[in-house]
Amino acid sequence: MRDELLKLIDEERPQVVEAVHWAARNGDRSENGDYIYGKKRLREIDRRIRFLTKRLDIAEVADPSKHHGSDQIFFGATVTYATSKGEERTITIKGIDEVDHLHGEVSWIAPIARALLKAREGDEVSLMTPGGVETLEVLEVRYPEPGH
């Protein structure tokens, strides 16, 4: 989130401002596509900057390593579970703005995370899926070591 904000402020916004400035010097703005598009894009960027700034203002830093050694699932846990079909999967529970689905990360508000939160190794939890209720068994819960 912070990286996106910095990129918008330091790179993208100045480029669009320069493009709008250039387009404005080209005369009639009412039919100037570069100018019209640039102003629209500038409004979008400013709206996103305001949104991200507000999110950062209320964000709280969570340290998942404080649960290192625990077998209970909290925010920041990396959880390995088995489905009722015997398939093993591993996910890490992260914040909404931090999730990278390609690396097995899920938001803490995702249905799978909500089903797993507060469970412990060895517990079975129920997950409501489009195909019905599925039972999952928690096989392992890991947290990063403190200081890493």
Image (cartoon, helix red, strand yellow):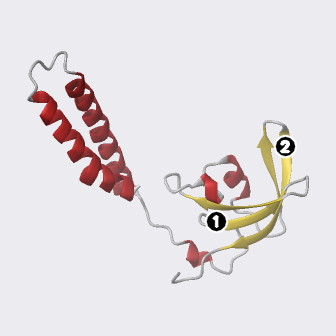
Question: Residue at left 31%, top 35%?
Answer: 44
Mark 2 vs mark 1: which is more N-terminal? 1
Question: Residue at left 10%, top 26%?
Answer: 26
Label 2 element class: strand
For the N terminus, the quadrant is bottom left
Q: From the top left corner, tell me how far across and down residue 66 is, in percent.
A: 57, 77
Dot 2 and dot 1 residues touching (CB under 8 Å): no
Q: From the top left corner, tell me how far across and down residue 106 is, in percent.
A: 62, 54
Image-quadrant location for residue 21: top left
The kind of residue on which mark 2 rests is Val
Q: Nearer the viewer, residue 7 or 114?
A: 7
Q: Which residue is mark 1?
A: 74
Left of 50 or right of it: where is 128? right
The kind of residue on which mark 1 rests is Phe
Q: Which mark is residue 16?
A: none
Q: From the top left corner, tell me how far across and down residue 73 is, in percent.
A: 69, 66
Q: From the top left corner, tell me how far across and down residue 13 is, in percent.
A: 24, 45
Q: Nearer the viewer, residue 26 or 7?
A: 26
Q: Which residue is mark 2?
A: 133
Label 1 element class: loop
Image-quadrant location for residue 92: bottom right
Left of 28 or right of it: where is 50? right
Q: Is residue 131 visible?
A: yes
Question: Residue at left 41%, top 58%?
Answer: 59
